[in-house]
């Protein structure tokens, strides 16, 4: 049995797309702010104690990387909404 986790956004209604875009934007902002805080914390530790907090840095970078598909999904939704507005 093949699992397809891809969503056909064109089949969603415009209000559904707006809601999905809003939730995606919220999740991206949360992840990016948290990742930035983690990276800043790891780097600031290097200046205060001379050693970088590698675990915090690694997890922050991983969190930013796994948010990439959500970013592309948000861009696809934006493009569909632009198409529908014309």
Image: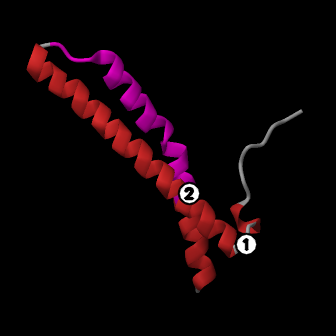
Vertically, is 40 above or below 68?
A: above
Q: Measuring 56% from the left and 57% from the top, which residue is drawn there?
A: 23
Which sits in the foreground, 34 or 21?
A: 34
For residue 59, side relative to residue 14 (left or right) = left
Q: Measuring 19% from the left and 26% from the top, which residue is drawn there?
A: 43
Q: Main secondary structure of the magenta part?
A: helix
User: Residue 58: x percent and y percent?
Assistant: 36, 22
User: Residue 42: x percent and y percent?
Assistant: 24, 25
User: Residue 47: x percent and y percent?
Assistant: 10, 22
Disc 1 is placed on an element classified as loop
For residue 73, side relative to residue 16 (left or right) = left
Is residue 26 highlighted in magenta? no
Disc 2 is placed on an element classified as helix
User: Residue 32: x percent and y percent?
Assistant: 38, 44
Is residue 60 highlighted in magenta? yes
Decide: few, some or many residues near mark 1? Use Cα within 10 Å; few <14, some 14-19, many ≥20.
few
Q: Nearer the viewer, mark 2 or mark 1?
A: 2
Residue 13's disc number: 1
Which sits in the foreground, 30 or 11?
A: 30
Q: Measuring 11% from the left and 14% from the top, which residue is drawn there?
A: 50
Number of callouts: 2
Q: Measuring 58% from the left and 86% from the top, which residue is drawn there?
A: 86
Which is nearer the N-term, disc 2 or disc 1?
A: 1
> Which quadrant of the figure has residue 17?
bottom right
Location of mark 2 (residue): 23
Range of residues picked out in magenta: 51-74
């Amino acid at each position: 049995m093949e699992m397809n986790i891809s969503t056909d956004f064109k089949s969603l209604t415009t209000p559904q797309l707006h809601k999905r875009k809003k939730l995606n934007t919220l999740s991206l902002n949360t992840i990016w702010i948290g990742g930035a805080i983690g990276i800043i914390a790891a780097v600031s530790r290097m200046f205060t104690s001379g050693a970088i907090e590698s675990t915090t840095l690694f997890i922050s970078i991983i969190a930013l990387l796994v948010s990439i598909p959500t970013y592309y999904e948000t861009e696809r939704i934006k493009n569909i909404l632009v198409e529908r507005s014309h």
